[in-house]
Structure formats: C-alpha cells, structure tokens
Amino acid sequence: MNLKKILSIFLLVSLQITPLWSQDADESAGPKSGIQLMITRASEASTISEVQNGWFSALSEAYYYFRFQPLESPKTVSRSKYAKALPVSDNFGVEVSEQDVFGAAAKVGATHVLIHTYSIEKEQNTASYYLELFTVKNKKVVMVFDKSFPLQEIDKNLDECSRIMFEKLVIKPSGNAADAFKRAILASDPKALEEFGSVLIEMSDKPDEKMAKK
C-alpha cells in the first residue's frame, strides 16, 4: 500500500473511531426526547452463506455514525447499546431477522431504525445497495434508497442517501454538520476502502470484548 493510502486510512480511522463506540449522551433518552435512530449493520445479499465483503458493512456503519452523531436531532443509539440488546448483530455482513431488529429497537427506545443490504461485484467494481428507514412503533417505511454505483463513489452515494433521510425526517444540518457535507470523508480508491473497512472490523472487536467483560 502506498503512503497516500496509508495516510487516508489513518485519517478516516481517527475521525470515526470515537463516534463509533462512544456511549450515549443520554442513556435514558426515549421517544419523548425526539427522534432516536438505531443504525444497524448492513447485511450482505449473497447466494453464498459465508460473508465475502464484510468491509462494506463496517464502512457504511462508520459512515452513518459519523454523519448523524454530530446532529442535535436525531439522537443515535450507540453501537454498544444496540449490541447489548441484540448480540447476534455483532457480525459484519450477517443477516439479522427484521423481527429481532425491531425487538431490539423497541428495547433501546429507538423511534426509527435503518436497515440496509448490499452486494459487491468485484469484477465490475460496483456495489448494489438497498436501504429502508422505518418507524419502530408501526414499522412504517419512511424512505427507500435503492441504487447500484461504482465502488469509488461510495461516499457520494451514501451522502445522497443521507440527504434523503434528512429530508424525510425534516432535519436541517447546521454548523459543523452542514460544513461536513461540503467535503468527502471517504477515499475514492476501492482497494483503500476495502482495507479501511477491514481495519474497522479489526478495531471493533476490542471495544466489544471490553463491554462483554463489564
């Protein structure tokens, strides 16, 4: 890997590792305090039972925490809190039943839940991505994002998806959160993105182990 890629990965890890495993600002927050968003780990849609591209799941999870956590609304349910409610969700890329996801969302006080799937075509260097945003109470679909795109445009397309979510949830980012959308936060090199996602998977094991021991 060349120096530029290494620096890119290091920068992204340093930017995103804190929001990924930080504790909730208000552990008791529930529907009365406004929108509470639970971000699930994307599952890989594949005919093969074994997950082949867990890096995309890790990358997309990190991306959404990075985009949503600075906002005053919605509040995001921390990864550690979600993992406690649904331990089976710990594995990247593995499908978790919607029934279990909604059960965990209700348990942690979420009002909305983001559920997404993906598939990777490495020969074509493309990703097919499908996301649904639901209300937890009545399981109503708030929005759908369904698109195929080149791997080097992951950042651009997840930005587009986030903007649609903001619009549907009537969110208007301001200050630093708004400024963040003026610049890309992910590299455009597919190999660097895969390596970064793999780094996130390795790093995610350590906080989870500490939580398990408590």
Image: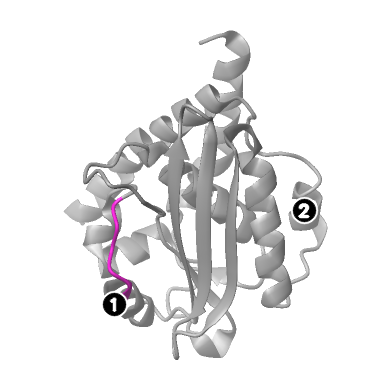
Q: Residue furthest left?
A: 213
Mark 2 Cα-neighbour bin, 10 Å: few <14, some 14–19, many ≥20 = few
Is residue 82 found inside the magenta-colored segment of the image? Answer: no
Magenta residues, start to end: 94-98
Q: Which mark is residue 99?
A: 1
Asked whether residue 70 appears in the rendered view, the answer is: no
Relative height, residue 142 to residue 214 (above, below) = below
| Magenta: main secondary structure | loop
Three-letter amino acid code of the residue under disc 1:
Gln
Is residue 97 found inside the magenta-colored segment of the image? Answer: yes
Three-letter amino acid code of the residue under disc 2:
Asn
Q: Residue at x 44, y 85 (%)?
A: 139
Q: Nearer the viewer, residue 96 or 79?
A: 96
Relative height, residue 33 to residue 210 (above, below) = below
Asked whether residue 61 appears in the rendered view, the answer is: yes
Q: Is residue 88 left or right of residue 136?
A: left
Question: Label 2: which residue?
Answer: 176
